[in-house]
């Protein structure tokens, strides 16, 4: 392989079936590559080929954002919304890498409590078995209060994830904004809110002696005090995109969310 990228890491999730086998196949075809576990990823690589599902890709994106390392995913998971390549497309991927037939998309991320997230940050009360009263502040000014199971603060990339399941809209990843969606609000008039990405979001829990449970991309969970501040992360996730078509985002929606299927008779 031509050395477009000097150091390539094949990042695998050993808990995902077929990931190790696919990684070995990729390793044989790309001489300047090595295989690493997602639990011990290397820092000094130019390209991360992530083999696994969306969870593996999200974990890799959080780690590599601070190094500005390019990321490309091979999906061997269930949905694979973020991954671009299938296991049978290895040769085509290598050809595009060699010919530089790709673009780099920098996806905005969220940050809070010295952690970052590509998809979303979810805030709930310490007691998961009951609703919490959560006060929402934008730029230190109180906007509203929610009696709900929690709040999802999402990026456009994450608008097709948990937020979508909670009734939030789909947002193009090329729009710089954040989306706030309540989880099971105890009211009929609560609606998602879209705000500019430069705004500061603060969430406080009303209940006395209650802490906030904060989850990053559904993976990293932190129990903190009764207040959390969320802002745009200073670093982005650098996604290597092989399909350079302008409308590819809408093609992915049709493919992954089955929008192209006609209604059943």
Image (cartoon, grey):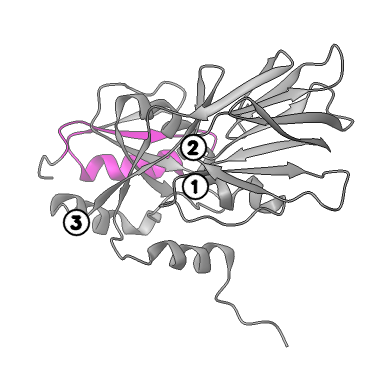
Which comes sooner in the sequence, label 2 or label 1? Answer: 2
Residue for badge 1? 157
Q: In the rendered view, does 45 fall on the left or right side of 206?
A: left
Is there any visible trace of residue 148 in the rendered image?
no
Q: In the rendered view, does 94 fall on the left or right side of 37?
A: left
Mark 3 and mark 2 residues within 8 Å of each other at the beta carbon: no
Magenta run includes residue 107: no
The picture places residue 53, in percent across and down from the top left corner, at: 51, 44
Mark 2 and mark 1 residues within 8 Å of each other at the beta carbon: yes
Q: Is residue 5 above or below residue 169?
A: above
For the residues marked 3 and 2, what is the alpha-carbon distance in whole angstroms? 25 Å
Which comes sooner in the sequence, label 3 or label 1? Answer: 3
The picture places residue 117, in percent across and down from the top left corner, at: 51, 32
Q: What's the magenta region?
A: 5-33
Q: Say few, some or many: other residues with alpha carbon within 10 Å of mark 2 (under 14 / 14 to 19 / 20 or more).
A: many
Q: Say few, some or many: other residues with alpha carbon within 10 Å of mark 1 (under 14 / 14 to 19 / 20 or more).
A: many
């Amino acid at each position: 392989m031509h050395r477009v990228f000097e150091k390539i890491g094949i990042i695998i999730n050993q808990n995902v079936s077929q990931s190790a086998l696919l990684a070995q196949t990729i390793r044989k075809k790309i001489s300047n590559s090595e295989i690493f576990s997602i639990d011990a990823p290397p820092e000094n690589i130019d390209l991360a080929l992530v083999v696994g599902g969306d969870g593996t890709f999200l974990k890799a994106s959080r780690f590599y954002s601070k190094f500005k390392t390019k990321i490309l995913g091979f999906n061997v998971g269930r949905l694979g919304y973020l991954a671009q390549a299938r296991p049978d497309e290895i040769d085509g991927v290598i050809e595009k890498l060699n010919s530089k037939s790709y673009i780099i998309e920098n996806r905005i991320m969220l940050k809070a409590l010295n952690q970052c997230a590509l998809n979303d940050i979810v805030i709930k009360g310490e007691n998961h078995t009951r609703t919490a009263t959560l006060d929402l502040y934008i730029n230190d000014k109180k906007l509203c209060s929610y009696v709900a199971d929690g709040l999802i603060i999402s990026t456009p990339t994450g608008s097709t994830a948990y937020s979508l399941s909670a009734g939030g809209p789909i947002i193009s990843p090329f729009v710089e904004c954040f989306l706030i969606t309540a989880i099971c609000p105890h009211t009929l008039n609560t609606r998602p809110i879209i705000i500019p990405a430069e705004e500061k979001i603060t969430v406080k829990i009303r209940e006395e002696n209650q802490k906030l449970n904060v989850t990053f991309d559904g993976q990293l969970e932190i129990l903190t005090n009764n207040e959390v501040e969320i802002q745009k992360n200073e670093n982005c996730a650098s996604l290597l995109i092989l399909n350079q078509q302008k409308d590819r985002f809408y093609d992915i929606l049709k493919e992954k969310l089955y929008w192209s299927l006609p209604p059943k008779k």
